[in-house]
Image (cartoon, rainbow, N blue to C red):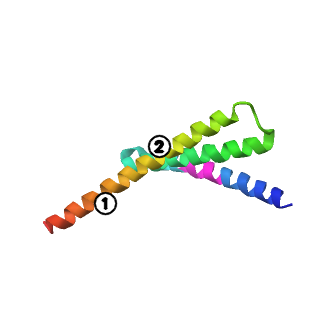
Amino acid sequence: MIDLAGNVVLAATAGLTWVFTILYATTTRFESTPTGAAFFSFLVVCSLILGVGVARLAFGDFAFFPWVRLALYLGILATLGRLFVLFLRAQWAARRARRRGPS
């Protein structure tokens, strides 16, 4: 019973993640800022990971699943690295602005 509940929650989460990703892509100008593009990349990778999880539940293991999983996890690692760099740049810019004082 708990397995079924977990599977339903996984499927619902995957579905909502895909809906949000598609809405974000079609209703915002995410590509206009580095942060928006990085966030969109993160959404896509999360949606793909959850989608592969649902596919694995629905169809069972497949021969190339470890390769798909590795590619997706590398994608999320790269995306999180990109977000981390953007975060650090924003922090450094804020510190420089504070040191300069009001204009």
Query: Label 2 crowding class (10 Å Cα cut-off): few <14, some 14-19, many 20+?
Result: some
What residue would you read off at disc 2? 78
Where the N terminus falls, by quadrant? bottom right
One can see residue 29 in this view: no
User: What residue span does the magenta drawing correspond to?
Assistant: 16-23
What residue would you read off at disc 1? 91
Q: Please report whichever mark, 1 or 2, sits nearer to the chain's N-terminal start.
A: 2
Q: Residue at x 58, y 40 (%)?
A: 72
Q: Amino acid at mark 1?
A: Gln
Q: Amino acid at mark 2?
A: Ala
Q: Spot the residue most to the bottom.
A: 102
One can see residue 8 in this view: yes
Residue 8, numbered label: none
Q: Residue at x 31, y 57 (%)?
A: 90
Query: Label 1 crowding class (10 Å Cα cut-off): few <14, some 14-19, many 20+?
Result: few
| Placement of 6 over or under 62, stated as above or below | below
Q: Is residue 101 left or right of residue 82?
A: left
Alpha carbons under labels 1 and 2: distance apart: 20 Å
Looking at the picture, how far across and down is residue 59, in whole percent? 80, 38
Looking at the picture, how far across and down is residue 60, in whole percent? 80, 39
| Placement of 76 over or under 62, stated as above or below | below
Q: Residue at x 61, y 52 (%)?
A: 17
What is the magenta segment's predominant secondary structure? helix
Looking at the picture, how far across and down is residue 102, in whole percent? 15, 69
* Quarter assignment of residue 3: bottom right
